Amino acid sequence: MSTHDDLPLADYDHLPLSALQHRIRALTEEQLRQLLEYERSHANRLPVIEVMTTRLHQLEGGATPSPGEPDAEPLPERPSPPQGGSPVTPQTTAEPSPPPRHGHPDHPGQSK
């Protein structure tokens, strides 16, 4: 079983999923299997396992590791987009109204 010190990505436990997706492309099949074993025996995060399993299948199917630095600095996370809309205030809130009565003559399709 792999330990944290044996992992091909030294800062593996601190990588966000987006950085991990990029960084595992530089790993060999053996290195990826080692990371997958470590993940399953420690955090066992489904999204991480899915990303690694997909990449492992690509390598088994003939893909080769992409050139790159497995120890490169992870990319910064993009900030969340601002939430749209206008703020609700007591002055802009709609007035509550009672629900329509069934069978009211002002509502077509209802019985009278």
Image (tube, rainbow, N blue to C red):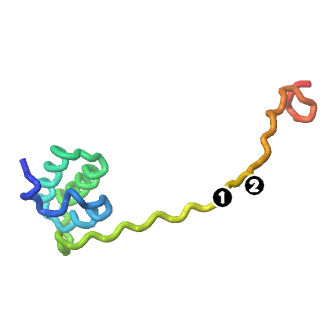
- Looking at the rendered structure, the kind of residue marked 1 is Pro
- Residue 62: x %, y % from top left: 18, 62
- Residue 94: x %, y % from top left: 77, 48
Q: For the residues marked 2 and 1, what is the alpha-carbon distance in whole angstroms?
A: 9 Å
- Looking at the rendered structure, the kind of residue marked 2 is Thr
Of labels 2 and 1, earlier in sequence is: 1
Q: Residues within 10 Å of mark 1 (few under 14, many from 20)?
A: few
Using the image as rendered, state which of residue 4 and residue 46 is in the foreground: 4
- Residue 71: x %, y % from top left: 17, 70
Decide: is 108 above or below 3: above
**What is the secondary structure assignment of the residue under circle 1?**
loop
Using the image as rendered, state which of residue 54 and residue 90 is in the foreground: 90
Q: Disc 2, disc 1: CB below 8 Å?
A: yes
Identify the residue position indicated by label 1 in the image.
Answer: 87
Decide: is 22 above or below 50: below
Q: How crowded is mark 2: few (under 14 residues within 10 Å), some or many (20 or more)?
A: few
Using the image as rendered, state which of residue 107 and residue 10 is in the foreground: 10
Decide: is 77 above or below 93: below
Query: At x 56% / y 61%, what residue is drawn?
Result: 83
Query: At x 88% / y 35%, what residue is drawn?
Result: 108
Query: At x 92% / y 25%, what residue is drawn?
Result: 112
Find residue 30 and report its image quarter: bottom left
Say the numbered circle drawn on residue 98.
none
Query: At x 15% / y 55%, what residue is drawn?
Result: 35
Image side of residue 27 versus residue 84, left or right: left
**What is the secondary structure assignment of the residue under circle 2?**
loop
Using the image as rendered, state which of residue 92 and residue 41 is in the foreground: 92
Looking at the image, which residue sits at the far front? 90
Identify the residue position indicated by label 2 in the image.
Answer: 92
The number of discs equals: 2
